[in-house]
Amino acid sequence: MKTFLFISIFAFFHISTFAQNILTVSDSKTSHLVCPDKVNYVQAGDYSIVQAEVVPELSNLIRIKALQPFEKPTSLTVVCADQIYSFELQYGNDALITYPIEIFYSQKALTFSGKMMADYLLKDLCDQVLDQHRQNFRRRKTEKDGIKVRLNSISLKNDALFFELQITNKTNMAYDIESFNFWITDKKKSKATNVQEYQIFPEYQRNKVQRIYGDVTVREVFVIQKMTIPDQRILKIEMGEKALGNTGRKLTFSLKNKDILKAKSLK
């Protein structure tokens, strides 16, 4: 009876561990993730400590090995059979040789609405933008009543532009965001003619920030299909506050075509 109880507890421990998508890897042996179909994407968080790659001869098999012992866990993302799997990799000598991927939790790998690339690729690219800590557009900013919005960087990958915004709340009161709006509009507004504005809808937003707490700075990335701005026109970026009776503050700054052309390529 005691033996059966021990086995049951041990099995439950392993099931619980798998439910959290934790993988143990070692530098003394190679582990393998076995997938039901061809692997479409694999990305380790830190390739300096972990090697993760699809086996060339078997497109449904991923081999994983630690290059050295490590203490801080790293990540692994895998997409196959229209499912996305996110793992936390930890180092240990009890790593298994084979892990069937079906025992782990997964989510549907939704495609990018603009059909330029998949959402999981956009997520990784946005994270790459945030990891680079670029501040190439110090003058492209606006500030009002203790709320500051600044453009940090513009990056480019294929047909996607990545706009990184930094929002700082210097007050003690939280700022609730109603929306972010992007407009192509006339550089100079004339009273004699109608102003023509064209709204651009971002195809992807990384963090979906809705509230900026007091004395806090957050960064957000928006993905927009690549574009250029015609002469005498600008790209207006606006952040609106959610408040009673449509009385919220709006912060706006503009970009020129030369700013778009400074976009840095992502690898």
Image: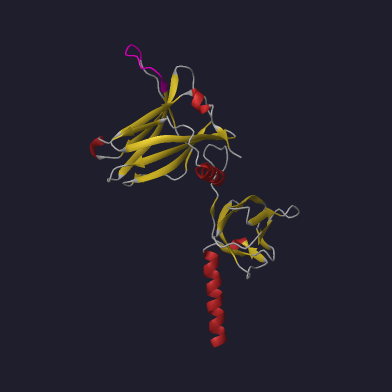
Looking at this view, name the residue that lies furthest to the left: 245
Residue 31 on image: x %, y %: 67, 63
The part of the chain drawn in magenta is 185-193
- Residue 57, magenta (yes or no): no
Residue lying at 56% horizontally and 75% vertically, measured from the top left: 11
Question: Is residue 205 placed above or below 184 in the rendered structure?
Answer: below
Q: Quadrant of residue 198?
A: top left
Residue 86 on image: x %, y %: 55, 56
Residue 188 on image: x %, y %: 38, 17
Question: Is residue 20 placed above or below 52 in the rendered structure?
Answer: below
Residue 14 versus residue 132: which sits nearer the camera?
A: 132
Looking at this view, name the residue that lies furthest to the top: 192
Q: Main secondary structure of the magenta part?
A: loop
Residue 141 on image: x %, y %: 39, 32
Q: Quadrant of residue 70?
A: bottom right
Left or right: residue 225 versus residue 171 is right
Q: Is residue 97 visible?
A: yes
Give the image's coloring scheme: secondary structure
Q: Is residue 1 visible?
A: no
Residue lying at 53% horizontally and 78% vertically, measured from the top left: 9
Residue lying at 48% horizontally and 36% vertically, measured from the top left: 135
Question: Is residue 77 placed above or below 190 in the rendered structure?
Answer: below
Residue lying at 30% horizontally and 40% vertically, measured from the top left: 242
User: Where does the C terminus fall, quadrant-wise?
Assistant: top right
- Residue 190, magenta (yes or no): yes
